[in-house]
Amino acid sequence: MSFGTKVGIASGALVLLLGAGMGWILSRAEKYPAGLDWKGFDSYWTVESESPDYQVGFVGEGVEIDSPKGLTMWYNKPVEAPCVIEYDARVMLEREGDRLSDLNCFWMASDPAAEDIFARSAERGGKFANCATLQLYYVGYGGNYNSTTRFRRYNGMPDPALLQEYTDPEHLLEANHWYHIRLVCSDGRTEYWIDGERLFAYDDPDPLTRGWFGFRTTLSRTQFKGFKISPYHPTN
């Protein structure tokens, strides 16, 4: 795990935060605070970065991640199905060094070799290839320099299978566009929705029903807001 700089804008003042949060055991009655502000970030999120030079900034109701290499921003509380995970996100392309790529996410992630997703964080070191040791669902939206959008199911072994892929422009990233992303887990099925379109749906013969959520990106500047987790109902 690497420790970068966390920079927030609050009432015109510059705020620096240090440290990282820890995980909790989840009870079904608990709420899930978003924690995407300078006051709550370290309580609800843990950054696992390949580089120590990442930056986390806070503006308005959201967070901005500037990642010079691979980075996962884990939500510290595990989640149990049936549930819905929602958030808004965009990849910035405004200044020198910005790159339009990799609006990615992990969900229902767990480590077959440990009770806690954070136990082997240092071994993974923020490197994407090292995440193959986990069990999880993964979507890489606009990956590979915005040339692919892919869905995989990791089983803790190397080279997780590619289950579905898009390469058409309609399913790749648009610069600075706020996307609404919705992840559904219920009755052995997981779905990935973006801007109201269901891109991926998978009926898992061995479903992942408990695990952690993580924003995933690399070599990009990405903003997130509106994060929430709620119980799944057929009407939502």
Image (cartoon, rainbow, N blue to C red):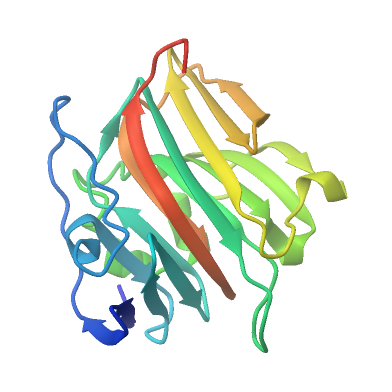
The answer to whether any part of residue 26 appears in the image is yes
> Quick check: 163 left or right of 33?
right
**Residue found at x 39% / y 66%:** 60
At 72% from the left and 64% from the top, the residue drawn is 175
On the rendered image, what quadrant is the N terminus found in?
Answer: bottom left
Q: Position of residue 65 (x, y in %)?
A: 45, 71
The residue lying at 59 percent from left, 40 percent from top is 152
Decide: is 209 above or below 154: above
Which residue is at 60% across, 33% downward?
A: 193
Q: Is residue 218 visible?
A: no
Which quarter of the picture shows residue 108? top left
Q: Position of residue 9 (x, y in %)?
A: 33, 79
Residue farthest to the front, as pictured: 11
Instruction: Out of 31 and 116, give the one closest to the viewer.
Output: 31
In the image, residue 109 sits, relative to residue 89, either above or below, namely above
Of residue 96 and residue 108, the one placed in the foreground of this image is 96
In terms of image quadrants, where is residue 173?
Answer: bottom right
**Relative height, residue 97 to residue 199 (above, below):** below
Q: For this view, does 135 lie left or right of residue 205?
A: left
Which quadrant holds residue 41?
A: bottom left
Name the residue at the right extreme: 168
In the image, residue 231 sits, relative to residue 69, either above or below, namely above
- Residue 125 picture location, percent across and down: 37, 71
In the picture, measured across the screen, residue 221 lies left or right of residue 50, that is right
Q: Position of residue 33 (x, y in %)?
A: 23, 46
How many tags in the picture?
0
Q: Nearer the viewer, residue 60 or 82?
A: 60
